[in-house]
């Protein structure tokens, strides 16, 4: 669980949650991130591409 509290793990989940089933995402977040995940966190993902325009 300590790993899942890292900013990198949260940013990976922020990206991944958009491609998994909504039911799974809701279950996973309830179990792993009960306090929620910050919106916009996917921008912290190491492979995220940000628009600079």
Image (spheres, helix red, strand yellow):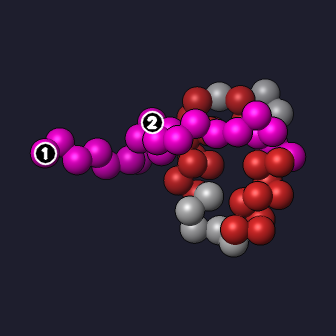
Tell whether position 5 is magenta: no
Q: Secondary structure at mark 2?
A: helix
Residue 30 placement (x, y as % from top left): 83, 48
Report if residue 40 lies within the magenta region: yes
Rounded to the nearest angstrom, the CA distance separating label 1 from label 2 is 18 Å
| Magenta residues, start to end | 31-53
Q: Can you say which quadrant of the picture contains the N terminus?
A: top right
Left or right: where 22 falls relative to 28: left
Residue 36 appears in view:
yes
**Which residue carries the number 2 mark?**
44
Q: Please tell me whether residue 13 is drawn above or below residue 36 in the rendered image.
A: below
Q: Which quarter of the picture shows residue 9?
A: top right
Q: Nearer the viewer, mark 1 or mark 2?
A: 1
- Percent across and percent down for residue 24 are 77, 65
User: According to the image, label 1 marks what residue?
Assistant: 53
Q: Image quadrant of residue 5?
A: top right
Of residues 2 and 14, which is closer to you in this image? 14
């Amino acid at each position: 669980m300590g790993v899942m509290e890292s900013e990198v793990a949260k940013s990976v989940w922020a990206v991944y949650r958009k491609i998994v089933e909504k039911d799974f995402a809701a279950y996973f977040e309830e179990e792993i991130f009960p306090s929620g995940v910050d919106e916009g966190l996917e921008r912290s993902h190491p492979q995220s591409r940000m628009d600079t325009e």
